Amino acid sequence: MLRVLTAIATLTLVAYAGEESIKLKEGEGKALVEANCISCHSLDYIQMNSPFLDKKGWEASVNKMIKVFGAPIKQEDVPKIVEYLTKYYGKKE
């Protein structure tokens, strides 16, 4: 059992080891995104989805995080988060 727990702990550390290198683009709303999104997943999730999501897509994604996964995001912060994600990581047409 101890070996299993040690392996899980090691894999978790390895998974988060590269997190420091991921930086979001500077802009209004960045602090809200960092504060609300990183508590549940890594920032690379944002970069990974940026080629696919426009404003509607980011809005749906943020609302899914709240309604399905229980992300503790204040409703008044949703428009600011969506605006930031759309402006800096929105699908380029």
Image (cartoon, rainbow, N blue to C red):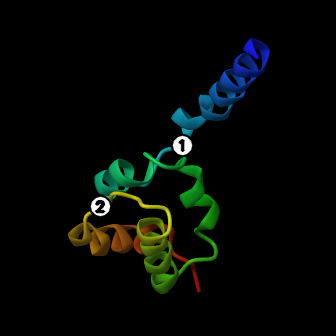
- Residue 44 in percent (x, y) is at 59, 51
Question: Residue shown at 34%/67% (left/top)?
Answer: 81
In the rendered image, which quarter contains the C terminus? bottom right
- Taking the image as shown, residue 77 lies to the left or right of residue 54, namely left
Q: Which residue is mark 1?
A: 22
**66 or 41, which lies in front?**
66
Residue 5, x across and y down, in percent: 70, 20
Considering depth in this image, is 93 or 41 the residue closer to the camera?
41
- Residue 87 against residue 41 in the figure, above or below: below
Task: Please name the residue shown 54% across and 43% down the image.
Answer: 22
In the picture as drawn, the residue positioned furthest to the left comes out as 76
Question: In terms of secondary structure, where does tag 1 sit?
Answer: loop
Give coordinates of residue 34: x percent, y percent: 38, 49
Is 93 above or below relative to 44?
below
The quarter holding residue 6 reads: top right
Residue beneath disc 2: 29
- Which residue in the rendered view is the most extreme toward the front? 1
| Residue type marked 1 | Ile
- Image quadrant containing the N terminus: top right
CA gap between label 1 and label 2 equals 17 Å
Q: Is residue 5 left or right of residue 32?
A: right
